[in-house]
Image (cartoon, grey):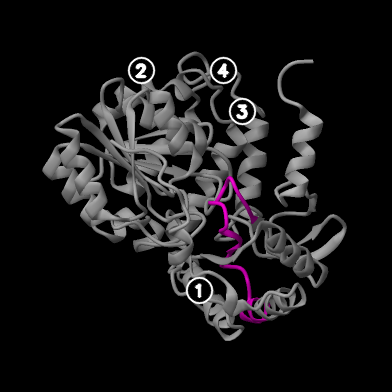
Amino acid sequence: MSGVDVERRLEELQDLGLYRRLRMTSGPQGPRVVLDGKPVLLLCSNNYLGLADHPRVREAAADAAMRWGVGAGGSRLVSGTMRIHRKLEERLAAFKGSEAALLFGSGYLANMGVVSALAGDGEIVFSDELNHASIIDGCRLSRARTFVYRHNDMDHLAWGLERAERRGALIVTDSVFSMDGDVAPLGEIVELARRHRVRVAVDEAHGVGCIGPGGRGAVHEAGLEREVDVVVGTLGKALGSYGAYATCDRELARYLVNTARPFIFSTAPPPPSVAGALAALELLIVEPRRVERLAANSAALRDELAREGFDVSSSTTQIVPLVIGDATQAMAICEQAIEHGVFAQAIRPPTVAEGTSRLRLAVMATHSRDELREAARVLGRAALKTGFRPGDGLPVAAARDLAPERAAA
């Protein structure tokens, strides 16, 4: 049989320490879950504010299922746009201070749709080298050339923009980078975009609900909400549901409705997910202290990990990477931690660059200080038991140097 040798490829992945399997969690995504039958502290969930299992969010989703049904039944442009979709779009636009918001089926679809709609053949997209895979795939779908600038390196971005000779269409970046926990220099990006007359799109998947005034994200924290052309956000992380959105001006929203292929050709988000996200957004607005609690917990975990000898100096957010380097050793530490009641998933290539495998820790506002202190101790002991000393890990800044250049103008 021609094509991929599936059995051989699976064996190669196992030999390289890159084999993956599905783990089964029981119960809602709270601070603690049952993982493959074992109770553990959950330290790798994106349910940052603990809203996925909040009673009001659950009730809103259940009520919507009874009122509007489980599925939307069609794409947004056919029969799938319901009153609940429009209501959430209006609330999101008001929350983000934009003229319009547009719901997508997922963050992946939103990024692919926005990037591919705003750049085309003969143009250039400027993308940070650590951007999420959905942005990378959006660049591919656009058929534009992609200039991948070194992570948060504004001199490299400026050089690329100069070389583009007015062919630049879009600068796109994560706000909070999902594997490193650092924040993009949005002010400098916007300034370069103004100078070279290109649009800016920012993915706030890990920013909304986590940083900025009232959890509005990094764009608002930088005071740039009127300067960024499109902000993409997810409903599936801090807002505890599923789906995504893009906020922008009304004209651009109309343009995306007519050109963003993932929007046009996907079934509309299901009413229970939309209603759950709406309830979560309302909770975020009336209870902004959840955001403060998340920031305090994030700082507490970094402090406890530093006491164990881990270098966590690069993270300023709820995402805290422990860079191990070797994929097999990262998995060994992950499994040891699970055995002692802490689930912190190992992240390996191709999600991160070769030689930068890590445990990617994600803090929740609903964790207690005692839980975070114990988690740091467990991780420290797990590392030592596998022969890894926390001080041997690569600082995140050094690990980034291992990421290969992926494109040039």
User: Quick check: is 364 in the magenta stretch?
Assistant: yes
Residue indicated by mark 2:
258
Alpha carbons under labels 1 and 2: distance apart = 44 Å
Residue 406 x %, y %: 42, 41
First-in-chain label (4 vs 1)? 4
Report the disc number at residue 264: none
Answer whether labels 2 and 4 touch (C-beta < 8 Å).
no
Q: Secondary structure at mark 3?
A: helix
Q: Position of residue 367 (x, y in %)?
A: 63, 71
The alpha-carbon separation of the residues under discs 4 and 3 comes to 13 Å
Near-viewer residue (109 or 20) = 20
Q: Which residue is mark 1?
A: 312
Q: Which residue is mark 4?
A: 74
- What stretch of residues is rendered in magenta? 347-373
Spatial CA span between label 3 and label 1: 46 Å
Give the quarter of the figure containing the C terminus. top left
* Residue 388 in view here: yes
Q: CA distance from mark 2 to mark 4?
A: 16 Å
Q: Position of residue 203 (x, y in %)?
A: 40, 45
Q: Secondary structure at mark 4?
A: loop
